[in-house]
Amino acid sequence: MDQVETIREVFQYLRQFTGTTFVIKVEYPIIQDTLFPVLMRDVAFLHQVGIRIILVPGAKERIDEILKDYHIEGKTIRGIRVTSHEAMPFIKMAAFDVANRVMTSLAASSINAVIGNWVRARGIGVVDGTDFQSAGTVDRVLTEGLRRVLEDGFVPILPCIGWNSTGRPYNISSNELAVVTAARIGAEKLFFLTAGTVFRASEFTVPEGVPIAPGGRISNFTLADLERFFQLNQDKEERLELLRMARRACESGVERVHILDGRMEGALLSEIFSNLGSGTMVYSNRYAGIRPMKPTEIIDVLRLMKPFVERGILLPRTEETLAETYQDYIVFEIDDAIHACAALHLYPEGVGEIAGVAVDEQYTHLGVGPKLIGYLLEKAQELGLKRVFVLTVATIDWFLKLGFEEADLSALPEKKRAAYDLRRRSRILIKELKSEST
């Protein structure tokens, strides 16, 4: 039965992530590791099931090797390589050599990849008296071209080189490149696959309430938790760089950032397709703008629902009905205006109904609908409900992608079953909820 549950869990996540974009930064020691071909097969699997992958290979150690071979000295200040004009051709050689290795490994799984120059950079310049010369920072990511490559079924590989408008190359941080690319392309997830970075509770001062996984690994941070963590661990600054990068990504719009040990076989798939995961996740408040409905907003919600009622997608509601049930509703608000709503109605059998889902069409690109459903599912879980259901005539595929499954009339609570309109022939979809103890 455990295997069956695992399979169900994987399929649920597959539906959720198909069509989304993941940015994966891989440290160079992993590329050197004997398990790297296995990791690339896992990446190939993600690509084959419809997840759009962008790879950012780190090249720090390879650059060190090449510069040493050619007797070129260098230094690093505040984590930034001071890059002389003499060193730049060799740094390009190292960066593209690493990118080539990644592309070759993907080819072994019959995955088409392409190395490209989608990154525009500018020089860091002189900071506190140090001229960083050909060291740069990301100025712009050419997202339109990058999206075309993704839509054509390729895996883009971004080496740690960026060019300015005149074609001058700069050495840029792979971590920064991954963060900026994930934010600009609108990636759902950003992964840092490290050569052994694990955040263990025993090695840090951990704020109360931060989840600790079996074995002592810190499971996840909200941004608020992370700020408290930084304050409590100022003496470990050198170990916090990736967490600071994760915070920057989340503040730039990336919903979830995962830091994991890429040398563990299956770590990437485990992090994506299991509830326990294998690394440390940092996530933003994906429900920002969502709050309970107020009784003074009944007219606004009815106005929002009106076009969906006229098209037969929603059943009509009255002011009186909403006045009685407004406490079941949540709304999505931007600039003091209501742009989406949904409700969770409770039944005595420990079952909930998600209903009245309406999203202003000008805001659907923000992913508001899935966020409303996610918010209500978490609320249902907190209330201890066994399952939730939805009746729909026009959004079956949408709910299936969110992990719901089709069911028959017997799945409805008695009161709802008795009121079911046979003429409307709504499809019945359910989602089983796991108890907190499982």
Image (cartoon, grey):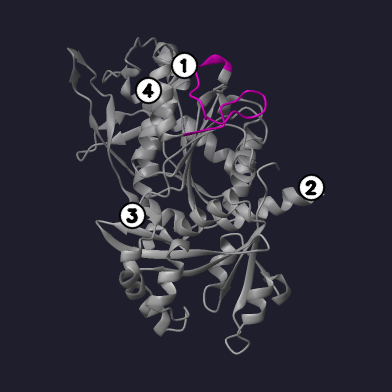
User: What's the residue type where badge 1 is placed?
Assistant: Glu
Which is closer to the viewer, label 3 or label 1?
3
Q: Which numbered disc, 4 or 3, marks the residue that appears first in the sequence?
A: 4
Left or right: residue 225 versus residue 107 is left
Query: Which region shows up in magenta?
Result: 202-221
Q: CA distance from mark 2 to mark 3?
A: 42 Å
Q: In the rendered image, which residue does mark 4 sit on?
A: 90
Q: Which mark is residue 65?
A: 1
Residue depicted at x 38% and y 64%: 340
Q: Assign a secondary structure to mark 2.
A: helix
Residue 426 against residue 267 in the figure, above or below: below
Instruction: Give the crowd class for mark 4: few <14, some 14-19, many >=20 residues within 10 Å.
Output: some
Based on the picture, tell me whether residue 282 belongs to the magenta stretch.
Answer: no
The tag earlier along the polypeptide, 3 or 1, is 1
**Between 221 and 115, the one nearer to me in the picture:** 221
* Cα separation between marks 4 and 1: 10 Å
Q: Which residue is mark 2?
A: 3
Query: In what element is the residue under mark 4?
Result: helix
Q: Please name which of the two marks, 4 or 1, marks the residue nearer to the observer.
A: 1
Query: Of the residues under marks 2 and 4, which one precedes in the sequence?
Result: 2
**Residue 174 seen by the camera:** no
- Mark 4 and mark 3: Cα distance apart in space: 30 Å
Of discs 2 and 4, which sits in the foreground?
Answer: 2
Proximity of marks 2 and 4: CB atoms separated by less than 8 Å: no
Rendered location of residue 18, percent (x, y): 55, 57
Q: Secondary structure at mark 3?
A: helix
Please state which amino acid type lies under the numbered disc 2.
Answer: Gln
For the view shown, which residue lies furthest in the right direction? 1
Q: Nearer the viewer, residue 165 or 418?
A: 418
Q: Which residue is mark 3?
A: 144
